[in-house]
Image (cartoon, rainbow, N blue to C red):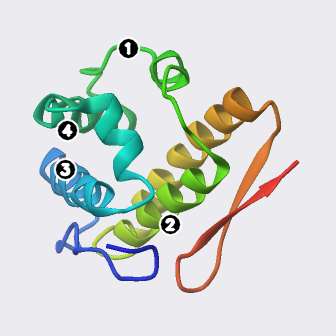
């Protein structure tokens, strides 16, 4: 998958009630594209190795906690990510582009906005941690995200 190709559809439901199953499908489809992405895959593979099943489970728990208030995730997102090697600003633009594309359809407007808002908050925090500069993520009408650096 490249940044310009469409992702695999994550969620096909259109009802307003977001479920854990919706988040499971989103996380698994999104990270399948991350794993195929030539820019992102090396960073993720170096950190996750053969533990993708564990990572995907944790990501489902993270998004369930954020979106459904399940409180099933524990850990420090910031501390974990700050240990990654080789992260560049372009990784943020690519990750956010894939996230925007995977959340573009199949979610009620409020849920889609919240999924993107949370991803943006985390992205800005991590960007500041990695590069000591603030960032803003701006999506165009096709879902491509650019990083505006402060």
* Earlier-in-chain disc, 4 versus 3: 3
Distance in Å between CA atoms under marks 2 and 4: 19 Å
Distance in Å between CA atoms under marks 1 and 4: 14 Å
Q: Residue 16 in the image: x percent, y percent?
A: 28, 64
Distance in Å between CA atoms under marks 4 and 3: 16 Å
Q: Secondary structure at mark 1?
A: loop
> On screen, 9 above or below 71?
below
Q: Residue 111 in the image: x percent, y percent?
A: 40, 58
* Earlier-in-chain disc, 1 versus 2: 1
Give residue 11's mark. Answer: none
> On screen, 28 above or below 104?
above
* Earlier-in-chain disc, 2 versus 4: 4
Q: Which residue is mark 1?
A: 75
Q: Which residue is mark 4?
A: 56
Location of the N terminus by quadrant is bottom left
Left or right: 108 in relation to 131: left
Q: Secondary structure at mark 4?
A: helix
Is residue 6 something one can see in this rendering? yes
Q: Which residue is mark 2?
A: 97
Q: Which residue is mark 3?
A: 19
Report the residue at 59% width, 48% height from top.
Answer: 120
Residue 122 location, quadrant: top right
Left or right: 118 in relation to 112: right
């Amino acid at each position: 998958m490249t940044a310009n190709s469409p992702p695999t559809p994550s969620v096909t439901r259109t009802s307003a009630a977001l479920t854990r199953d919706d988040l499971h499908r989103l996380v698994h489809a999104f990270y399948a594209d991350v794993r195929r992405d030539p820019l992102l895959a090396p960073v993720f593979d170096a950190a996750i190795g053969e533990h993708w099943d564990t990572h995907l489970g944790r990501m489902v728990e993270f998004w369930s906690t954020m979106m459904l208030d399940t409180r099933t995730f524990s850990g420090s997102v910031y501390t974990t990510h700050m240990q990654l090697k080789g992260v560049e600003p372009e990784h943020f633009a690519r990750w956010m582009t894939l996230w925007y594309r995977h959340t573009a359809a199949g979610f009620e407007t409020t849920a889609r906005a919240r999924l993107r808002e949370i991803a943006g908050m985390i992205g800005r925090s991590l960007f500041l941690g990695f590069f000591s500069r603030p960032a803003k993520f701006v999506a165009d009408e096709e879902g491509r995200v650019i990083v505006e650096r402060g």
